[in-house]
Image: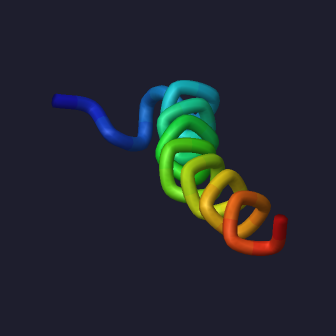
Amino acid sequence: MMRRGTPEADLQRAVVQALRIALPRTVIIHHCAN
């Protein structure tokens, strides 16, 4: 597997992972706030 060959794929994977972690948290926070 080439990890350094595809920086944009690495970035996309990081963005998707961040969204997966951040999205449910914000939803939970909004639900708790209301």
- Of residue 21 and residue 27, the one placed in the foreground of this image is 27
- Residue 22 rendering spot, x and y as whole percentages: 62, 57
- Taking the spot 83% from the left edge, 65% from the top edge, the residue there is 34
Q: Residue furthest front?
A: 34
**Is the residue 6 above or below the residue 13 in the image?**
above
User: How many numbered tags mark residues here?
Assistant: 0
Q: Residue furthest right?
A: 34
- Of residue 8 and residue 29, the one placed in the foreground of this image is 29
**Is the residue 17 above or below the residue 8 in the image?**
below
- Residue 21 rendering spot, x and y as whole percentages: 51, 56
**Is the residue 25 above or below the residue 24 in the image?**
below
- Of residue 33 and residue 1, the one placed in the foreground of this image is 33
In this picture the colour scheme is rainbow
Residue 31 placement, left or right of 13 = right
**Quarter in which the N terminus is drawn:** top left
- Residue 13 rendering spot, x and y as whole percentages: 48, 36
Residue 21 placement, left or right of 32 = left
- Taking the spot 58% from the left edge, 53% from the top edge, the residue there is 18
